Amino acid sequence: MQVIVVIIAYLLGSIPFGYLIVRRKIGADIRQTGSGGTGATNVSRRAGKAAGVLTLLLDAAKGCAAVMIARVISGDESVIAAAAIAALVGHIFPVWLRFRGGKGVATGVGIFLMLAPVALLCAGVIFIAIVVTTRYVSLGSITAAVLIPLFIWLHSGLQPAFTASIVAAALIVFAHRGNIKRLASRTESQI
């Protein structure tokens, strides 16, 4: 049953909402433009703000749903943390799109809204501050992802959610590797 929960979480996370929204709205493959990701920022640049907001909400919702399903079916904190990571892996490496998806930020928001809302709130404040001052969404996202483990540790100590946050941060930073190169060369797009 624990394995089934993790598989369900992966499949849920792998639903490519951004890809489907852009395909439906303008008939294009979102992965062929901008950052190449299927996430909200790239979708909003290609298909408009409404499409970006819808993508953000749906990607966050699938992160929430994966954790909720694991909580209902298993209740074991380790299984819940594993399901959270599976959903994030599904978003970044979706089986439906040949393992080329988004950066995992919105899905991560949904996951940590359920696992560690206080840590998410603290990271969200920093995200907003960075985006407002630099206009780089990617820099805010990377920084927030890296700080969530610290906030979880400070608020709750070592627990499965802390371990999940470290893995999630590593995945999100890895997914942003192209953005990091562009930030370093000062060619990253601003909002």
Image (tube, rainbow, N blue to C red):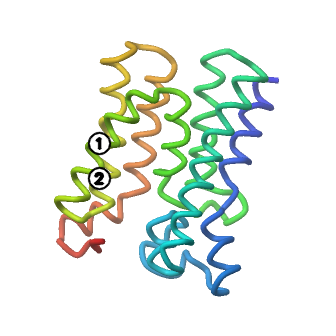
User: Quick check: 82 left or right of 9?
Assistant: left
Q: Which residue is mark 1?
A: 125
State the image coordinates of residue 59 (x, y, percent, origin top left).
59, 53
Identified at 72% across, 47% down, the residue is: 12
Q: Which dot, 2 or 1, sits closer to the camera? A: 1
Q: Amino acid at mark 1?
A: Val
Identified at 57% across, 55% down, the residue is: 57
Residue 20, compared with residue 152, is above or below; it is below
Q: Report crowding for label 1: few under 14, some 14 to 19, many 20 or more residues within 10 A (C-alpha).
A: few
Q: Which residue is mark 2?
A: 140
In primary-sequence order, the first of circles 2 and 1 is: 1
Residue 117, compared with residue 41, is above or below; it is above
Snapshot quadrant of residue 176: bottom left
Identified at 65% across, 57% down, the residue is: 94
Q: Secondary structure at mark 2?
A: helix
Placement of the N terminus among the 4 image quadrants: top right
Residue 101, compared with residue 82, is above or below; it is below
State the image coordinates of residue 70 (x, y, percent, origin top left).
71, 27
Placement of the C terminus among the 4 image quadrants: bottom left
Q: Nearer the viewer, residue 93 or 135?
A: 135
State the image coordinates of residue 153 (x, y, percent, origin top left).
34, 19
